[in-house]
Image: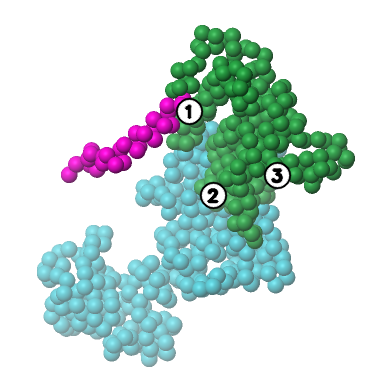
Chain colours: A cyan, B green
Amino acid sequence: MTLLDAHLVVDRGAFRLDVAVRIAAGEVVALLGPNGAGKTTALRALAGLSPLTAGHVDLDGRALDRPARRVWVPPERRPIGVVFQDYLLFPHLSALDNVAFGPRRRGVDRRAARASAAEWLARVGLAELARRKPRQLSGGQAQRVALARALVTAPSLLLLDEPLAALDARTRLDTRVELQRHLAAHAGATLLVTHDPLDALVLADRLVVIEHGTVVQQGDAASVTARPRTDYVARLVGLNLYRGRAAGTTVRVGDGLTFTVTDHVTGEAFVAFRPAAVALYSGRPEGSPRNVWRATIQGIQRHGDNLRVLLHGPIEAAADITPAAAAQLHLTPGQEVWAAVKATETHAYPA
Amino acid sequence: MRPASSRRAPLALLAPAAVGLVFLVLPLVGLLYRTPWTTLPARLTEPGILTALRLSLVTATIATGICLVLGVPLAWLLARVEFRGRRLVRALVTVPLVLPPVVGGVALLLVFGRRGLIGGWLDTTFGVTLPFTTAGVVVAEAFVAMPFLVIAVEGALRGADARYEEAAATLGAGRWTTFTHVTLPLVAPGVAAGAVLCWARALGEFGATITFAGNFPGRTQTMPLAVYLALETDLEAAIVLSLILLTVSVVILASLRDRWVSA
């Protein structure tokens, strides 16, 4: 059942957001995109913090924002919970009163509001910190209070704005697992705004990738990661991606370089392969069907246990090789090498 | 390299600075020097002084209350709502700040006087007369002191993160509830500082008060007016009254410094 049906159009002079999102009950959708793509604008439009220019926001069968029909429900009357990026816990209220704030404003009496707030604090594991003020909470604790505050009113739509961005790496790991548990238990729809692909992949059922205010790709994690359609998505999931013209099992990309692939595609197509699939040689390699090109080493970075070599040539590519292989080849920036990728390591699909 | 502060300050700056400091402090020293310390306790309990002190405290407090009730919403309007002519309104609010208080008193007379714009109507409709009454003192003080409060509170509102108000909205709070439950607590220190400044200004009000409310002992004669009057008849009484006002000012300054200004 579709809970949220939105077509968000926000015109702000130089920038235009035009994104359609539908989220089912219990579904978690990640809105993924680089800085300035319009993620926060979309979230604010859904929450009612800024109005739409055109389009619509329908939640649970009720129109919340339809500029064409002059329908607009203010944020305080929308059944929507928001976890802001830096949480925005009210500094003058205790953790308990922060969580009780929503129920109180929605007409629940003080005792009942505090009781449900206490229950939610217990659910996020902070029962003993109920009396603390926000400034006495760690980042991870504040994040959980913010989540409890947003969920205590059982909103039809939960909006999360970069919920883990303000946390250090270690806390983020724990909090992400926690968050996943709470999102799974949330009966309403959830929209997670993030620029961190890991958050999106771990927390969301479906990804919607936006760039420059429009959707460039959407689908479940597996299809988006296997078949990226823009450089941004390819970088996010760590793939080399090229667009070209395909004929059967060859795809011509860039400057006269033709890839031999195993997939059959015709017309405009993408070719993708993992950096680890790229092998480097000092001389032209012979033997099994390989895609080979001559490249210049532009830079070498650490990448986990391996080295990531950035290659310049007919195509820009990244190659992951072991430190041992790098030492054997005496790789240095500026050096010319041969790069090779087996046809079986490539993945080609229509553009 | 030696820090800049350890370099010798040029005499051309040092000399006028020292003179300026002496100029500011010397009158206060003179006041303390001439204070009749031995008769002070007896002086303090003189009925005339106590009456003026009580009237001053009561009127300044009521005026501050009026300024809070009217000035905080005005500051909120200036800080949070976009409207045409906002700059003009802000300029108008600060006019009493630079206006000579006597002119303010004359202006108040022209509006609230018996034959004034509103005064006549107030008189015939409600039987309320403001000029030359204790209520008139409050009106004069509020008129002069309100800009201090509005400016302080507007500054605090501009400094406060408006996104807390958005967070409150997403939690179901309307604009009024957001104001009372989120905005006001966030800017409470600014409101308190503004109220103290406002109260201090009201306490020291002279020009508008004497013009609009006159100088009737027990009714409109506040401390500054009593000081001025005593100066002509009883110098010691004037000194004692001045000392009280000085003490109050210093206490206010100290409390502001410790609690809000440096915090």
Q: Is residue A343 above or below residue A19?
A: below
Chain that bears disc 1: B
| Nearest to N terminus: mark 3 or mark 1 | 3
B103 with respect to A141 (left or right): right
Q: What amino acid does circle 1 point to? A: Ala
In the rendered image, which quarter contains the C terminus of chain B? top left
Question: Going 82% across and 35% down the picture, which residue do you hit?
Answer: B128
Q: Which residue lies most toward the right here?
A: B124
Disc 2 element: helix
Principal secondary structure, stretch drawn in magenta: helix
Which mark is in front, 2 or 1? 1
What residue did someone put label 1 on? B254
How far across and how far down the image is residue A125, in percent? Answer: 50, 39
Q: What amino acid does circle 3 point to? A: Ala
Same chain for labels 2 and 1? Say yes or no. Answer: yes
What residue did someone put label 3 on? B107
* Residue A111 appears in the rendering: no
Q: Is residue B12 magenta?
A: yes
Q: Residues within 10 Å of mark 2 (few under 14, many from 20)?
A: some
Question: Going 15% across and 64% down the picture, which residue do you hit?
Answer: A324
Q: What amino acid does circle 2 point to? A: Arg
What residue did someone put label 2 on? B158
A171 with respect to A125 (left or right): left
Q: Magenta stretch? A: B1-28
Which quadrant would residue A333 be assigned to in this image?
bottom left
Same chain for labels 3 and 1? Say yes or no. Answer: yes
Chain that bears disc 3: B
Q: Is residue A169 above or below residue A52?
A: above
